[in-house]
Image (tube, helix red, strand yellow):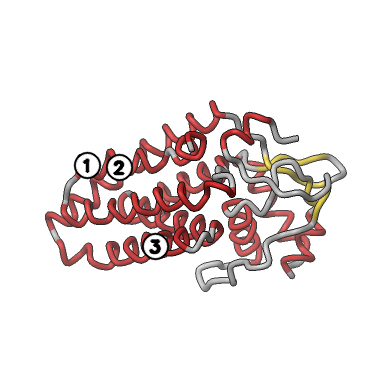
Amino acid sequence: MISDESAALGLRRSAPGPTSTAVPPSVPTRPDSAPSLREHALLVIRHAITTGDLDEGTIYSAAGLAKQLGISLSPVREAMMSLVTEGTVEAVPNRGFRLVPVTREDLEEIIRIRALLAGPAVEALCARVTDDPASSEAALGDLRRNAEDALAAAANDDTIGFMTADRLFHEHLLEYGLGRRAAEISLRLRDQSRVFAAHSIAAVVDSESAQQIVDLVGLIEAGHSDEARALVVDNLFYFKRAADH
């Protein structure tokens, strides 16, 4: 069951029964960068977690997920076991898998760790912009597009679109600032947090968060390292804004 505390934090919930095979109707296509069916299955399942389409209180069978994804059972099961290993999912004997519950203390710890990565990432990007602007153009272009996509989705009350663009923004921020390993660590932690604003306030909270990352790109472009670092840390505390509204 999802705790009352989790509901207060803004964890998005759906209303299926105790066992479900549902996954989002719109999932990522298999990119060239996904070298295997397992990697693709992991990408799709992470997307469903990020957008709130997998519910904390529901048990999902590997066979049901495989059928919905149109992927054979083995890579889906392997993907779910990878998520078990990293602590995002837990196995339920003879039944399937479910998301590991998240408390406020868990969220605070996750954000503190992510901030340890995000702060140096924006500082590195600011330094690169200052020292060699031409080498930063592609990275800044990607970040700007991600931020603008997040802002547009929030304006259209598209929570899934916002969460997808916001996740991609932070992935690129860490990858361009510190490298791929740092991005993967941060994204795994993000997937474990699974925080969404309640539907009645989602448009407001998402818009505030999206505007922050738009502003963050501007600070990085200007090389304002201290301000950028403070803003990215504040942006990570999405769950507090969701709880305060």
> Is 224 on the left-hand or right-hand side of 143?
left
Q: Amino acid at mark 3?
A: Asn
> Is 13 on the left-hand or right-hand side of 238?
right
Please name the residue shown 36% across and 66% down the image. 145
**Which secondary structure lies at badge 1?**
helix
**Which secondary structure lies at badge 2?**
helix
Q: Is residue 84 above or below residue 125?
A: above
User: Which circle's residue, 2 or 3, is located before the other in the chain?
Assistant: 3
Query: Label 2, label 3: how many angstroms apart (C-alpha)?
Result: 17 Å
Which of the numbered marks, if any, corresponds to residue 217? none
**Which secondary structure lies at badge 3?**
helix
Q: Amino acid at mark 1?
A: Glu
Query: Label 1, label 2: how many angstroms apart (C-alpha)?
Result: 6 Å
Query: Label 3, label 1: how many angstroms apart (C-alpha)?
Result: 20 Å
Q: Which residue is mark 1?
A: 227
Please name the residue shown 24% across and 48% down the image. 124
Q: Which residue is mark 3?
A: 146
Q: Which residue is mark 2?
A: 231
Q: Nearer the viewer, residue 157 or 219?
A: 157
